[in-house]
Amino acid sequence: MSAILHKAQLNTDPILKIEHVKKYYPIKKGIFSKTVGHVKAVDDVNLLVFPGETLGVVGESGCGKSTLGRSIVRLEHLTEGSILFKNQNIHQLPEPNMRQVRSELQIIFQDPYASLNPKKRVSELLINPLLVHSRLTADEARKKASELLDIVGLSKYSLNKFPHEFSGGQRQRIGIARAVILQPKLIVCDEPVSALDVSIQAQILNLLKSLQNNFQLTYLFIAHGLGAVKFMSDRIAVMYLGKIVELARTSDLFKQPKHPYTKALLDAYPVPNPLSRGKERIILTGDVPNPAAPPSGCRFHTRCPLAQPRCREEEPGLQGAQHMAACHYPLS
């Protein structure tokens, strides 16, 4: 499987290998709940994530990026494929063996209101994981939780409060602290700023960057906003209807996208001077096809203004070495 490597990664094994991952949800009908089809949320995805990097995953709503993220931390069970974290296939590990893995593999959820248990104080949310996964005493765990709250920008007195006593941005800081407190190797950031005010988003992104440097974290960063993905990511994977359609270094992808779908996303991204875009724009029309019955051939051909007869018949694979695109006629 091809991958785009930085100089520092040439002699580094990936921390995460996603190989031919599929996640299908059954569609059931009738009084006997007979399966009549499947929603193909993630359909044959391959990715590598290297230690210390941030791999961004971007795409429209319903493209499967959050399902992929939840599958990485085993909140979803795979239909096919494998996910290897530190060379362990986590979807084949028995639950007792997942205990150590869960301390090294964490997730930050999109909704800061739904992701925190409203019945538990912040102290329970942060200290209990330490008591379960480490040998710290209760006093040592409380001290570490207090120190981490200070790092994420909250007062130590927050330990005694309940989640409903905080704003959305503060709740997300608590969610970030909960993900970081065990010092994991990899964190899946599932749209961590999309539910926040714009004024708060930049603060949270800067916090994630700072934590990555301080704790040597690796991120899989899922987002809608291209600005956030550009700021956070070393590489970007673009998803469309369950598949990766482009994979490149961030600078290369923004400078010269090869897939028409990526070009359309970038053309829709607001810039200070719209006249600087030029006239060669791709504007998406129509809705995303039904993932239960994806189009034949290239899945983007129903909305692509550059589609040819071959696109309707033959499905393209990812092509290229340093900049990969799943397109029969990549942009130049």
Image (cartoon, rainbow, N blue to C red):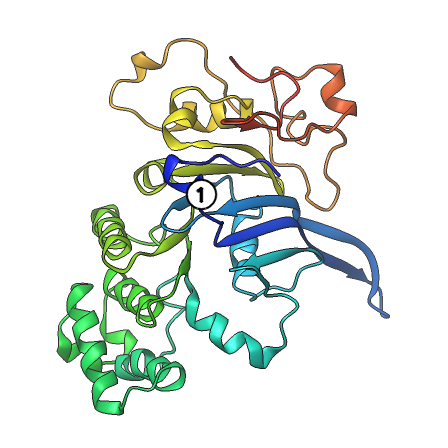
Element type at marker 1?
loop
Horizontal and vertical percent position of residue 197 = 26, 50
Q: What residue occupies the far bottom of the structure in this picture? A: 138
Which quarter of the picture shows residue 230?
A: top left
User: Which amino acid type is marked by label 1?
Assistant: Asn
Give the residue number, with chain letter if any, for mark 1.
11
Which quarter of the picture shows residue 156?
A: bottom left
Horizontal and vertical percent position of residue 49 = 47, 48
Horizontal and vertical percent position of residue 5 = 45, 36
Q: In this view, does 70 lie to the left or right of 81?
A: left
Q: In this view, does 11 lie to the left or right of 195?
A: right
Q: Is residue 147 left or right of residue 296?
A: left
Q: How crowded is mark 1: few (under 14 residues within 10 Å), some or many (20 or more)?
A: few
Q: What residue occupies the far top of the structure in this picture? A: 279
Q: In this view, does 74 lie to the left or right of 172?
A: right
Looking at the image, residue 183 lies above or below residue 17: below
Looking at the image, residue 10 lies above or below residue 113: above
Of 132 and 29, the residue lying toward us = 132
